[in-house]
Image (cartoon, grey):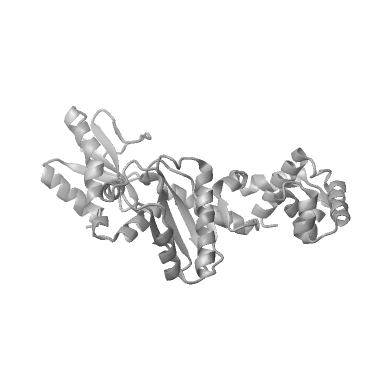
Amino acid sequence: MTEVEKTVKTTAEKLGINISFYAEGTKPVGMPVCDRPFESVCDDGNYTFFRFSFKNAGYVGVLCGVGEVEKNYASLLPAYLESFVDKEADLSKTDYLKKILKGECSSLGVYKYATKFSVRGAACFAIVIRVPKMMKETLAVIEQYGGNSLDTVVQMTDETCVLVKYLDETENEYRSSVDYADFLAQSLKEELGLDVAVGVGSTVRELKDVAESYARGENALRYADLFEAKGNVHSYREFILIKMMEDISEGKLEKYFSDLTDENFREIFEDEEMLATAEEFLQSSLNVSETSRNLYMHRNTLLYRLDKIEKATGLNIRSFSDAVSFRVLTVIHRLLGK
């Protein structure tokens, strides 16, 4: 007998009711099955069905009858069944939070953590920090510079840690999260001589959504690597276009790229020197002087390359609208790994 079977059987015996169940997405023989999609509770006129999770797997519970008693049980049983696998109370604060960040904690477990550590209803965001070395010392510095007593830093892997930062009433704007992450990176540079890469996740209203913030912070670092973005601190907001394009199927991206480019266009994309020049120009806000300085390139050489790009592609990337079109195509090019 599996653990979930034992738990359901024990629950049924304690409550004096008959409960059967099956795994989501299956149609077992010899028991009632709900043939239509539903979110929490529904019935078919004879049986009441409810959804519940057990160790991150989804199940559908079945109760005989469709009265108020069955509906009440169906509403309460998911949380009750989840409580049997709520082992987080035995974990340390950081291990507990690590499970929450990875999305491995039950909703009841998140609620208990938020209550225990007084962070219920507190907005927060995740800062993902990639550390090349000296992790122990890095954690100590982050704890020292933490903004308030609620902030908690967690080591996720040998090379990454995450600071969950809670906001007070004066820290509710997007820019504050990036500014704080930049301050943290500078502090690590000054204290330990480390150049760290930092990904800033979205600000969420409650801790229950912090796993999403963490995922976005990780994605910000991944996109920064893929597109060789300048700087140490990156917000998920920088890469909204890339995320949107990544959600499109590879087949469609291939078709877009094929339809919107020709042989001359693709020659530019295959020329790493030209592509690097265009990338720096875009990252320098289409400023010729700044791009020349950053590339240590004579202004006339840069203008020659921009003209060459325009001749090959038909896009004058000194124009904002053409620069946007060129950026979309470079994103597709990188995502396809061409």
Asked if residue 165 lies left or right of residue 266, the reply is left
Outermost residue toward the bottom in this view: 134
Could you tell me residue 308's position as x and y percent? 87, 51
Q: Is residue 62 visible?
A: yes
Picture quadrant of residue 268: bottom right
Quadrant containing the C terminus in the rendered view: bottom right
Quadrant containing the N terminus in the rendered view: bottom left
Could you tell me residue 320's position as x and y percent? 75, 40
Residue at 74% x, 45% y: name it.
Answer: 326
Asked if residue 289 lies left or right of residue 15, the reply is right
Could you tell me residue 174's position as x and y percent? 52, 42
Asked if residue 242 lies left or right of residue 27, the reply is right
Asked if residue 86 lies left or right of residue 36, the reply is left
Picture quadrant of residue 73: top left
Residue at 39% x, 60% y: name it.
Answer: 154
Q: Is residue 269 visible?
A: no
Residue at 46% x, 44% y: name it.
Answer: 203
